[in-house]
Structure formats: C-alpha cells, structure tokens
Image (cartoon, rainbow, N blue to C red):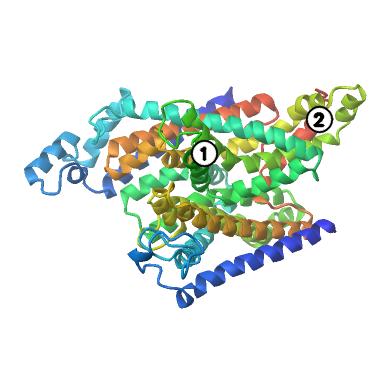
C-alpha cells in the first residue's frame, strides 16, 4: 500500500516536471529572444547576468532561448523516435514470439545483433553513407531503440503463451496472427505504456549523443547535444556552456524515468506483475538462481 | 558441443551479414573519396588518378571481389587517407578500446558489488540512498556530459588528471570512470535485488549461526549465488558498454575504434570504416559468444533455447 502511494507521488511529481519542460519548449519562441540572434558585444556572459538569465554563448546567443528551442527539437525527435522504435519493437517482439520457428529464429538473431552491435558505429556508417538530416536522425533512433523494446515484448509473449486462454484460442482454431494480435496483443498494452517514457528518455540521450558527435541535428538549429559540442571547446573558460544543456538533458530524462517507474509501480499494484524493461529480462535468471539454491547448493 | 557449434555458426552468419551490408551500403550511397582526398581545384586527371589508386574506378562487384580476396588473405585493404593497411590502424585502436571497456567493466562491477550488497543489507542506510542518487544520475545524464563534467573538474580545475589523449595509465582513469557510470545503474539494481532475495535463504542464516564473519557471508557465500543475474545484465549491456566506449573515446580524444571511425567518416575512407566495422562486429560477436558460453558453464541448465 505504501509502495503504491510512493509510486503515485513519483508519477505526479515527474509528470508535473515533464509538463513544465514541454511548456517551456512550446512557449519559448513567443516569450524569449530568437535563439539564433547573435550579439557579439554581450558574448560569453555567465548565468544571472542582465537580460540573459542563463548567460550567452561565444556568439552572444541567449542560452535560455537556445535551451527552450533545443527542448522542442529534442522532444519532437525523441517522441517520433520512441513511437517508431516501439512500433518496430512490438512487431518484431510478436514475430519472435510466434510459433513459426524460422521466423522466430530470424527475428531473435536480428534482435541479438542489434543489441550487441553498438548503435554509434551503426550511426557513423549510415551517416557516412547518406548525410546527417532530421529524417536520418529519426531513422537512426528507431534502429537504435527497437531491439530493447522487442526484447521486453518477446519475454511477455513467451510468458503468455502457456496460459489457458491462449491454448483455448489455439484449440478453437485461431491462426497465429489472430492469437498474437487479438489475444496476446492486449496484454502487452500496459507494458508498452510503461516502457514508452523510458524509451523516450533513452531517445533523448541518443539524440544528444548523436548531435554531440555531429551526426544528428546540424547547426545552426539549436539542440542540447549540439550546444554541448560547441561548448566543449570552451570548457576551461565558460563552464555554463556545457553544464546547462547537460542539466536540461538530465532533468528531462530523470522526469521521464520517474514517469516510467511510477507507472510500473502503479501497474504492479494493479496486476502484481513487474513490467520494467531492465528487470523483465532477469526474471528468468533470478528464478533460475533461486531454484539453484533450493536445489541444495549451500556454497 | 552441439550448443557450442551452433553458437559459432550463428556468430559467423552475423559477422558475414554485417560485412556484406556495410560494404554495399558504403559503395552505393556515399560520396566520392577522390574529391575529398584531392583539393578543391583538382583537375579531372588528378581525380581519376586518385580513383585508380583507390580502385573506385571499377564496378562495385569487381571491388567486392578484390575485397573478399583480401579478407581471405587477412587484409582489409589500404586506408584512402593514411595510405596504410587498415589492419595496422584498426588493431591497435581495438586494443585501446578493449582496454578502456574492460577497465570500465571492472570499475563498475566492483562498485556495483560493493554498493549493491551494502544497500541490499540496509535499504534505508546512507549508502543505499547515495547509490540510489548515483544510479538515477548515471541513468539520466548522458555519458558524454558526465565525461565533460569530469574533465572540467579533474583536469581544468584541479589539474590532477589529463583531459585527453593516451600516453599513460592516467589517461585511462577519466574515460573509464565515465563509462562505468553508464553501466553501473542496471548492474547495481539487479545485484541489489538478487542479494536481497538471497538474504532470506536458509544457508545465510546457517552461515551466520556458524559465526562466520559478516563480510564473509555477504561477499563470499551470498555473492556467489547472486552473481548469475548480474552476469545476464553484463551480457545484455555489452553492446552498450562498447558503444559507450566509442563515445567516451571521442570526448577524451582517446585513440580507439570510435575516434578512428569518425576520422573514416569525415574522410569518406571506406576501407577504414569497413575495417573498423568488421573488426568491431567480430569483437562484439565474440564477446557475446563468450558471455553465453560462460553462462552455460556457470549454470548448466541453460542450454540452447532453455533460457526462455
């Protein structure tokens, strides 16, 4: 009971925080100065100076409005990436939970490869084969994120398989597609809602990382990762150039993770089943290890 | 044995799949490396000369045949930019990356075991709360930002550690700690959960009753049983670890696979990029294979398909 209460507090707090970030991103362009507006006289102002509450960068651009504008870019790209990767991940997870052995084998291997192969390297190859642009960035994020979602979905599908309602459906003669979509599909919905905010937070980090490496959002469009890249050169003179965008990323991700955790606590209270992506995969191993102990391993 | 062979076969299929797709992806879509090698006003003759030298004047399939022939003889071609064999560039870089990755893994595992066990024992204690904060920070702050913060703290302000390059073991500390922060949260959470589950077991009570020292009970007896889930997480995080190593290299200007790949990207140096990707793919597949096999050795009940 207490845990449920704590989960709700976390959920409310994180949602309010996330709401604030969205509001800043949306209202930024109406209330703040142009994020591309250069003013070399007031360049490199530290935070809390007159007219520039978060300071300015080496070109005199206002950091607060760049942060707000970057929030818009980051959030839009991340949400698109999240939706894309969850869609692909759910489809692949369903396929790898299917009874068709070859199909399941192929999509399992594909998931393994994607999980094992570092997405940064993939991003470098793809960007060098094309050019860095927003559609490519979203494609990269979908590629980077679908596998972890697919794993969660697969483990749920596999745990639903032996249940009576699935067997009943198969006995009645429902084909695989129908079993997966009509019967198992709805049980995935809570899990998808729980991993969505976590996925979005991973996407924000990915977007920032790719932009930091120069593979994502291209200047002069402000993005949090790009601001960090530009600030890296001035690390010894202007700490705020790298600190502030980083804090923006960290707060946004923390809020999203908080929403995810809060949702998962709430759903666990409702369904008594944990659907947290980082833990669902270890459920097997944990039950194995406890079996190991009861099996007489006394160290 | 059958299990082993089937895993090796899978690994081979994966590596060749990645190799072929990278080769054709780069050839069909990327720009002309001769234009990047030559200066802006190079005449067509000069460019053609470069193209002949690089072999890009021939059809893609001829290039692929040459490439395959090279691979069979253990060569990945010559880098366009450095005019040297790619293997000579990639292998030292791979060694550096692996060194960085393994150091980070060691740091994160020792921290996870120490902090995870202590916080499992006393979930309301100071250590538990501090590691909770550390986990949230590590999870939500991007790796390269943590790297930049560490540089500005330890290199710029305190001047204790170098900010980049790789000349001595001191260069390894900051990137390794940065990378460790990235994988620590999941390891710590899983370990702490499994230690907590183990503490209810009879053998723990027995060990206490026998009067064994506390640290001995926790770090020898409990840990051995609690490590299995941890190994799963480490296996899952391997891609994240090596991918993170690439980012950390770029932040700290550490001469590894990642920096080499970015050089290859900017110079449109296909052989170099290809070499980096193939070598990296082999490494990742190999590491995963090792983790899988290690897992079956430790827990023999996990056999092919038995894990799920």
Report whether B305 appears left or right of B29.
right
**B12 or A225: nearer the viewer:** A225
Residue A85 location in percent, x, y?
Answer: 52, 56
Count of labels in the image: 2
Q: Is residue A105 visible?
A: yes
Helix or strand or loop: what does disc 1 sit on? loop
Helix or strand or loop: what does disc 2 sit on? helix
Find disc 2 in the rendering and name its residue. A293
Quadrant of image for the N terminus of chain B: top right
Residue A156 location in percent, x, y?
Answer: 67, 51
The alpha-carbon separation of the residues under discs 2 and 1 comes to 49 Å
Marks 2/1 in contact by CB < 8 Å: the verdict is no
| Labels 2 and 1 positioned on one and the same chain | no
Crowding near pointer 2: few (<14 within 10 Å), some, many (20+)?
some
Residue at screen point 75% across, 33% down:
A289
Find disc 1 in the rendering and name its residue. B158
> What numbered label is drawn on residue A87?
none
Q: Is residue A98 visible?
A: no
- Label 1 resides on the chain identified as B
Residue A117 location in percent, x, y?
Answer: 48, 40
Q: Tell me if residue B279 comes above or below residue A69 in the rendering.
A: above
Q: Tell me if residue B90 comes above or below residue B233 in the rendering.
A: above
Residue B7, quarter of picture: top right
Residue at screen point 80% across, 24% down:
B216
Residue B186, quarter of picture: top right
**A95 or A274: nearer the viewer:** A274
**B75 or B61: nearer the viewer:** B75
Quadrant of image for the C terminus of chain B: top right
């Amino acid at each position: 009971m207490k845990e449920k209460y704590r989960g709700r507090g976390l959920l409310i707090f994180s949602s309010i925080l996330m709401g604030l970030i969205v509001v800043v991103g949306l209202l930024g362009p109406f209330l703040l100065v142009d994020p591309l507006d250069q003013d070399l006289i007031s360049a490199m102002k530290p935070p809390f100076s007159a007219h520039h509450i978060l300071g300015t960068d080496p070109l005199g651009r206002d950091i607060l409005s760049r942060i707000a504008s970057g929030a818009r870019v980051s959030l839009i790209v991340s949400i698109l990436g999240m939706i894309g990767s969850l869609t692909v991940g759910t489809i692949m997870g369903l396929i790898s939970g299917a009874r068709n052995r070859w199909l399941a084998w192929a999509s399992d291997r594909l998931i393994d490869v994607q999980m094992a192969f570092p997405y940064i390297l993939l991003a470098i190859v793809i960007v060098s084969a094309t050019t860095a642009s927003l559609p490519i960035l979203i494609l990269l994020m979908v590629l980077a994120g679908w596998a972890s979602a697919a794993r969660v979905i697969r483990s749920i599908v596999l745990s639903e398989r032996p249940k009576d309602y699935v067997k009943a459906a198969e006995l009645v003669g429902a084909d695989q597609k129908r079993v997966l979509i009509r019967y198992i599909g709805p049980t995935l919905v809570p899990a998808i809602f729980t991993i969505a905010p976590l996925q979005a937070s991973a996407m924000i980090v990915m977007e920032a990382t790719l932009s930091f490496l120069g593979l994502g959002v291209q200047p002069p469009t402000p993005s949090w990762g790009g601001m960090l890249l530009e600030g890296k050169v001035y690390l010894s003179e202007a700490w705020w150039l790298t600190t502030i965008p980083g804090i923006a990323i960290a707060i946004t991700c923390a809020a999203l993770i908080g929403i995810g955790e809060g949702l998962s606590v709430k759903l666990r209270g409702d369904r008594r089943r944990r659907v947290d992506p980082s833990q669902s995969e270890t459920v097997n191993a944990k039950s194995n290890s406890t079996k190991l102990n009861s099996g007489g391993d006394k160290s | 044995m059958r299990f082993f062979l089937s895993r090796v076969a899978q690994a081979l299929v994966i590596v060749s799949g990645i190799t072929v797709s990278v080769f054709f992806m780069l050839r069909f879509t990327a720009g002309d490396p001769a234009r990047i090698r030559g200066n802006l006003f190079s005449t067509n003759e000069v460019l053609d000369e470069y193209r002949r030298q690089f072999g890009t004047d021939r059809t893609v399939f001829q290039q692929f045949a040459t490439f395959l022939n090279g691979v069979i003889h253990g060569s990945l071609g010559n880098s366009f930019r450095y005019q040297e064999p790619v293997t000579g560039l990639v292998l030292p870089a791979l060694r550096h990356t692996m060194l960085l990755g393994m150091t980070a893994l060691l740091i994160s595992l020792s921290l996870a075991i120490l902090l995870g066990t202590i916080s499992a024992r006393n979930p309301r204690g100071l250590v538990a709360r501090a590691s909770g904060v550390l986990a949230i920070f590590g999870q939500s702050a991007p790796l390269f930002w943590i790297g930049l913060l560490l540089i500005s703290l330890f290199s710029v302000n305190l001047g204790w550690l170098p900010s980049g390059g790789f000349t001595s073991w001191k260069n390894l500390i900051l990137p390794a700690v940065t990378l460790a922060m990235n994988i620590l949260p999941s390891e710590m959470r899983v370990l702490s959960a499994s230690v907590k589950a183990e503490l209810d077991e009879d053998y723990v009570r027995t060990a206490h009753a026998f009067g064994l020292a506390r640290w001995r009970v926790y770090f020898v007896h409990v840990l051995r049983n609690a490590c299995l889930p941890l190994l799963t997480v480490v296996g899952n995080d391997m891609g994240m670890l090596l991918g993170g190593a690439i980012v950390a290299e770029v932040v700290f200007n550490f001469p590894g696979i990642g920096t080499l790949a970015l050089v290859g990207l900017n110079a449109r140096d296909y052989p170099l990029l290809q070499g980096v990707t193939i070598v990296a793919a082999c490494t990742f597949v190999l590491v995963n294979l090792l983790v899988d096999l290690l897992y079956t050795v430790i827990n023999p009940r996990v056999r092919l398909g038995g894990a799920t």
